[in-house]
Amino acid sequence: MFSLKGQTAIVTGGASGIGLATVWMLAELGANIVIADLNEEAGADAVRQLEGEGAEALFLRTNVAEAADVDALITATLERFKGMEILMHFAGIGLEQHVLDTTRENWERIIGVNLTGSFLMLQAAGRVMVEKGYGRIVAMSSMAGVRGGTGRTAYGASKGGVSAMMRVMAMEWAKHGVTVNALAPGGIETALVKKMHDAETRRAYLAGIPMDRYGTPEEVAAAAVYLALPQSSYITGVNLPVDGGFDASGVIKSG
Ligand SMILES: NC(=O)c1ccc[n+]([C@@H]2O[C@H](COP(=O)([O-])OP(=O)(O)OC[C@H]3O[C@@H](n4cnc5c(N)ncnc54)[C@H](O)[C@@H]3O)[C@@H](O)[C@H]2O)c1
């Protein structure tokens, strides 16, 4: 029933974590894959494995915070696959630092990659999709952009910005067949979280997650892939929590 055969998906951040899990699910549904990432070794390795399984795949080294890289990515994708129906924009970096310790340099680095990078990627993809009259865009927000966790000044602001921007794009492109949604994951076991969450963060986070565990990259990928299907045509402007119930939770008693 669900197929992406003949469609092309760009996955930024596709060399690792949530992006890599999404790449494999999209490929299983028959999509052509473009992995856009800074990590050349992991990206090229993933492409080799995908090709080994019979998928059409391409790795393009891309810094999503650089407009010239983003333009080159779109041009190379259109050259190879003649179209681009899906954008999964997942490239991002983390930072845990209290407000009073956050330097301007760190602020600009996080906003530059997570928010400006999202603007550049979504705008460039939207241009192609609006012209064609079809597209599925999934951006990457975070629970840190929804709830006020300690140490999330720059990171939370960057992700809250992604959600706000996603809604505006969803409105402007609604009549052009292009849906724009974002995922707002809670704690997901990836390289980023291993770096960002120390033992105390994990303990405090788990206390607020009704499912009492972190999620897996595959659990986020499954939500992303649903939003990439032609069948998700009436869903746009949604900031979808993938968080084990964290966003919905209040006082949770064990009995
Ligand atoms: N893991 C979580 O708990 C969690 C929760 C909420 C949101 N997120 C978001 O999900 C996304 C993916 O995170 P992940 O946990 O899979 O992390 P990850 O570190 O495993 O993967 C991120 C990928 O993005 C790439 N990347 C970083 N900066 C880039 C840039 N400037 N240009 C191109 N590629 C770049 C990295 O090389 C890496 O391959 C991020 O946007 C992150 O903020 C993660």
Image (tube, helix red, strand yellow):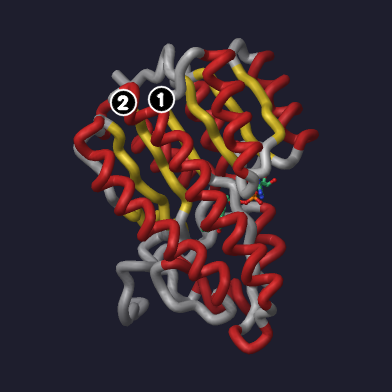
Q: Quadrant of the C terminus?
A: bottom left
Q: Secondary structure at mark 1?
A: loop
User: Does residue 157 appear to the left or right of 1 in the view shown?
Assistant: right
Question: Do the residues under discs 1 and 2 have CB atoms within 8 angstroms?
Answer: yes
Q: Which residue is pictured at 68% across the width and 29% down the height?
A: 60
Residue 23 drawn at (x, y percent): 55, 31
Say which quarter of the image contains residue 114: bottom right
Residue 157 drawn at (x, y percent): 49, 70
Which residue type carries mark 1?
Glu
Toward the viewer: 215 or 165? 165
Q: Secondary structure at mark 2?
A: loop
**Residue to which mark 2 is pinned:** 134
Residue 72 drawn at (x, y percent): 62, 29
Q: Which residue is pictured at 48% across the width and 49% down the height?
A: 119
**Residue to which mark 1 is pinned:** 85
Say which quarter of the image contains residue 36: top right
Kindly give the residue lying farthest to the right in the view shown. 41
In the depicted structure, whether residue 164 falls above or below residue 103 = above
Toward the viewer: 214 or 27? 27
Toward the viewer: 198 or 160? 160
| Mark toward the start of the polypeptide (1 vs 2) | 1
Q: Is mark 2 within 8 Å of ligand 1?
A: no
Q: Residues within 10 Å of mark 1 (few under 14, many from 20)?
A: many
Kindly give the residue lying farthest to the front in the view shown. 68
**Tag count:** 2
User: Does residue 143 appear to the left or right of 79 in the view shown?
Assistant: left
